[in-house]
Amino acid sequence: MLNLFKRAAPAPLPPVGEPFFKFEDAFLQEKAAHYAAGYNGAHPFPHVVIDDFLPADVAERIHAAYPGVDDPVWFDWKAGDTVNQPKKLGVRHASRMEGAPPLIHNMCYAFNSYTFLHFLETLTGLKDLISDPCLNGGGMHQILPGGKLRVHADFNMIEPFGLYRKLNAILYLNKDWDESWGGDLQLWNRDATKCEARVMPHFNRLAVFSTLSTSHHGHPEPLACPEGRTRKSLAFFYYSRHPEEGDATPRTVQWKKLEEATPV
C-alpha cells in the first residue's frame, strides 16, 4: 500500500557561505534608549540619524554584494516617472528579489524582525508596529547620476491590509561619498515651503523618521556624482493599525510642485 504520509527525503542544504546576521536585542535597546530623547523633539518632524549602525564588516559585505545598475533584479522607475523620481532604480516589491544576493535577503529579514521592531518602538514611543516583508516600495534603491526624488509626503496606507504607515528606516551604503555630489535627504517644514534639515547619504548611516501627512522629504536637486557612482540605500517601511489623527482616509504619495519649493 502506498504510504501517503511518508515524507520525501529533504533536499541537501547548500554549502555554508557567509555568516547569518541578526540584530542583538540588548545592543539595539541600548542604542534606542540613547537616541529616544531627541527623536520626537527633532525638527521639522520626528527623526534620528545614527552613524556606523551596522558592524563594520557587515556593512562592507553588503556594499560588496549590492547589485550593479544592469542587474535584472531592478525595476526601472526612471522609465515610468521622469518628473518625480527620474533615474531611480528599485525592486518595488519582494516578488522581484529572487535574484538578489543572499546577504541582501538576510538584511531584509533582519530589518523586518521583532528585534528591529522592538528597537523602533523604544526609539519612537510608537506601539504595535508591524513590518512589511513584501517590501512595498522598499528594499533596495539606487539613484543614477542626474537623478532626484521630488519633495513629497508618503502614501499613508496599504489598503488590502488596512495598515497605516508610521515610519521609514533608510540605511545608506555610499562609501567615500563626496558631499559636493548632493543626494542628501532633505526634511522640509509642514507646508513644504522650506528645507529645514539635511542628511547626507554616508556609508553605514541609518535615518529613521515618522511618516506623517506633513513629513515632506526628498532630494530634489539632481545627483552630481560621476558616472560609475550611484546613491545606494536599503529602505524599510513600518505600519500599525492606528492612523494618524485626521489622516485615516487612504491617499497616494503627495508630490510637491517644484516651483513652490525653496531650498534652505
Image (cartoon, helix red, strand yellow):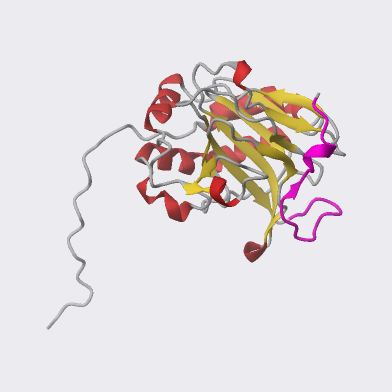
- Tell me the residue at 42%/26% (across/down): 58
Choose between 30 and 254: the one closer to the eye. 254
- The answer to whether residue 56 is magenta is no
Dividing the image into 4 quarters, which one contains the N terminus?
Answer: bottom left
The percent position of residue 100, horizontal first and vertical second, equals: 38, 44
Up-down relation of residue 181 to residue 255 (above or below): above
User: Image quarter for residue 86?
Assistant: top right
The percent position of residue 82, horizontal first and vertical second, equals: 62, 46
Residue sitting at the far left: 1
Up-down relation of residue 207 to residue 80 (above or below): above
Dividing the image into 4 quarters, which one contains the C terminus?
Answer: top right
Q: Report whether 9 appears left or right of 79.
A: left
- Tell me the residue at 65%/40% (across/down): 168
User: Image quarter for residue 39?
Assistant: top right
Q: Report whether 66 appears left or right of 120.
A: left
- Tell me the residue at 51%/44% (across/down): 90
The percent position of residue 130, horizontal first and vertical second, equals: 62, 50
- Start-end of magenta stretch: 242-263
- Tell me the residue at 69%/50% (across/down): 165
Q: Main secondary structure of the magenta part?
A: loop
Choose between 83 and 178: the one closer to the eye. 83
Choose between 258 and 113: the one closer to the eye. 258
- The answer to whether residue 247 is magenta is yes
